Image (cartoon, helix red, strand yellow):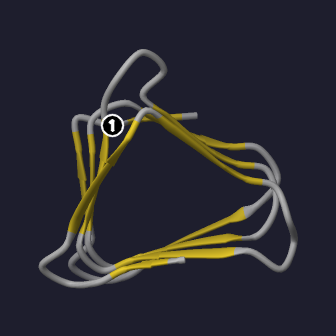
């Protein structure tokens, strides 16, 4: 799945749990709601844009942060 530059997607939570999965964020992923959680158990979070609010839990997958990426109001576990 990809979030393109200029796009904003808001989710309560998201889970990457497949080794073949890639979430590519060039725009903005806003974590908002009850859980405010992005869990990376397997696969890859490729971040060149912004993740806003909430928590990123790296629990076995890969988090690849590119130059210029922004973590705004994020707790990283």
* Depth order, front residue of 14/40: 14
Is 10 on the left-hand or right-hand side of 12? Answer: left
Is 33 on the left-hand or right-hand side of 40? Answer: left
Asked which quadrant contains residue 44, the reply is bottom right
Residue appearing at x 30%, y 80% in the figure: 26
User: With respect to residue 57, does 29 lie above or below?
Assistant: below
Q: Which residue is mark 1?
A: 74
Q: Residue furthest top?
A: 34
User: With respect to residue 35, does 9 lie above or below?
Assistant: below
Residue appearing at x 81%, y 55% in the figure: 17
Q: Secondary structure at mark 1?
A: loop
Mark 1 neighbour class, 10 Å CA radius: few under 14, some 14 to 19, many 20 or more: some
Q: Residue furthest left?
A: 6
Asked which quadrant contains residue 70, the reply is bottom left
Is 14 on the left-hand or right-hand side of 28? Answer: right
| Quarter the N terminus occupies | bottom right
Question: Residue 67 at what x, y percent from top left?
Answer: 29, 83
Residue appearing at x 38%, y 81% in the figure: 66
User: With respect to residue 12, does 51 lie above or below?
Assistant: below
Asked which quadrant contains residue 57, the reply is top right
Residue appearing at x 27%, y 35% in the figure: 53
Question: Residue 47 at what x, y percent from top left?
Answer: 41, 73
Question: Residue 7 at what x, y percent from top left?
Answer: 19, 73
């Amino acid at each position: 799945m990809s979030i393109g530059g200029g796009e904003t997607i808001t989710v309560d939570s998201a889970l990457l749990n497949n080794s073949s999965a890639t979430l590519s964020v060039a725009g903005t992923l806003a974590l908002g709601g009850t859980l405010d959680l992005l869990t990376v158990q397997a696969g890859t979070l490729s971040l060149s844009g912004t993740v806003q609010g909430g928590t990123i839990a790296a629990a076995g997958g890969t988090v690849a942060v590119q130059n210029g990426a922004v973590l705004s109001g994020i707790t990283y576990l």
